[in-house]
Image (cartoon, rainbow, N blue to C red):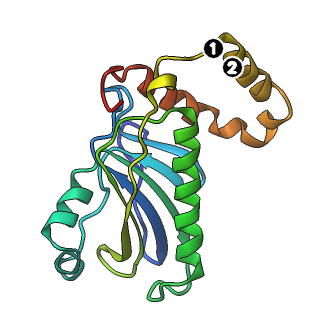
Amino acid sequence: MEITRDGMCRFRINQREKFGCIAIQNAGTAQDARGQFELAPGLWCVDRLPFKVGDFWAGQLGHRRLEQIENSNLLILAVAPTHRPEVLDDENEALLQKVQRTFYALLLQLVFHHDGAEIFSGARQDDNPDIRTITDLRNHLRPQVVSNFKSASLQSSERRIWNGRLSNTYGRRRPALAWFSRAAKRIPRNVGG
């Protein structure tokens, strides 16, 4: 992890690290939900792809897919060190599962508007990370009935959960959920629903 002049952490994938990523296109997020946010050690949300895709892998992905990834405005990334960056294996699968679980947890908070997503994994051996596997992620549509509804009982039950036993386990993720909540509250109600 690199520290910028203003003291903020700047996400990067280091050599001999593997990664899993969900790149979401046109995610309905608020302007103050921009930049980089560390959700947990090795798990980040960023507002643009933090690396340049190498020429070989750019050619393998094709222009359309590469453009979709590079124009994504919400990316969830998981990284971990590895002794085998050249191999696509169970380490990559575990990182993909980590970002998928995070994405689905976000959808439990709110099904937000987006125009599609790509889920991919790879590693960094040299100058740029390499994308080794990629697939489209199906769109999740926000239900009309629920989009404008947030009951007081739901809010109080959420508060009880955070103030109870689970806060010890998931307390570190609370700022991340607040970040996503701020973003979701600013989404126009007629978008994507």
Q: Position of residue 6 (x, y in %)?
A: 37, 36
- What's the amino acid at mark 1? Ser
Q: Which mark is residue 154?
A: 2
Residue marked by disc 1: 151
Local crowd size for mark 2, using a 10 Å CA cut-off: few (<14), some (14–19), many (≥20): few
Residue 136's image quarter?
bottom left
Tags 1 and 2 touching, CB below 8 Å: yes
Q: Please, what secondary structure does the residue beneath circle 1 have? A: loop
Q: Is residue 48 left or right of residue 2?
A: left
- Residue lying furthest right in this view? 165
Q: Position of residue 55 (x, y in %)?
A: 17, 78
Q: Position of residue 162 (x, y in %)?
A: 75, 28
Residue lying at 35% horizontally and 39% vertically, measured from the top left: 35
Residue 193's image quarter?
top left
Residue lying at 49% horizontally and 23% vertically, measured from the top left: 145
- What's the amino acid at mark 2? Leu
- Residue lying furthest left in this view? 63
Q: Which mark is residue 20?
A: none
Residue lying at 55% horizontally and 36% vertically, measured from the top left: 176
Q: Is residue 151 left or right of residue 181?
A: right
Q: Is residue 142 above or below residue 131?
A: above
Image label count: 2
Q: Please, what secondary structure does the residue beneath circle 2 have? A: helix
Q: Nearer the viewer, residue 142 or 23?
A: 142
Residue 2 visible in the displayed image: no
| 3D distance between C-alphas at marks 1 and 2 | 5 Å
Local crowd size for mark 1, using a 10 Å CA cut-off: few (<14), some (14–19), many (≥20): few
Q: Is residue 39 left or right of residue 86?
A: right
Q: Is residue 76 above or below residue 57?
A: above
Residue 158 visible in the displayed image: yes
Q: Nearer the viewer, residue 153 or 47?
A: 153
